[in-house]
């Protein structure tokens, strides 16, 4: 998980293995990546920062 946070903090692209993608609906404006198979990180980029919103399973989030 440290690798993901470091990459997000430097606004680097996440490797494909993390399945990073935009969210829609009530989560529009946020992104999600897979830390593990069913352990997801929801986050949001701002001009000078990144906000880590939540870590949870897909079922718990959606």
Image: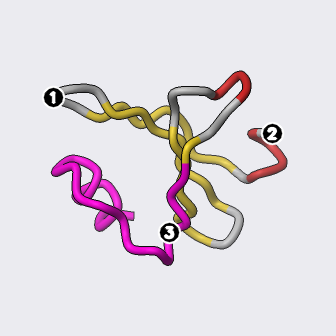
For marks 3 and 2, the one nearer the N-term is: 3
- Tag shown at residue 18: 3
Tally the numbered discs. 3
Give the residue at x 46% y 74%.
Answer: 16
- Tag shown at residue 24: none
Q: Is residue 18 magenta?
A: yes
Q: Is residue 31 magenta?
A: no
For marks 3 and 1, the one nearer the N-term is: 3
The secondary element bearing badge 3 is classed as: helix
Residue 53, position as x, y percentages in the image:
49, 32
Residue 21, position as x, y percentages in the image:
54, 52
Q: CA distance from mark 1 to mark 2?
A: 28 Å
**Is 37 left or right of 30, judged from the image as shown?**
right
Residue picked out by circle 1: 48
Give the residue at x 23% y 58%.
Answer: 12
Residue picked out by circle 2: 62
**Is 8 left or right of 17, judged from the image as shown?**
left
State the residue in front, 56 or 25.
Answer: 25
The boundaries of the magenta stretch are 1-21
**32 vs 52: above or below:** below
Give the residue at x 52% y 33%.
Answer: 30
Residue 13, position as x, y percentages in the image:
30, 61
């Amino acid at each position: 998980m440290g690798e993901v946070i470091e990459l997000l903090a430097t606004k680097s692209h996440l490797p494909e293995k993390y399945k990073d993608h935009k969210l829609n609906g009530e989560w529009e404006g946020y992104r999600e990546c897979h830390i593990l198979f069913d352990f997801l990180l929801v986050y949001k980029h701002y001009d000078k920062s990144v906000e880590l919103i939540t870590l949870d399973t897909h079922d718990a989030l959606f």
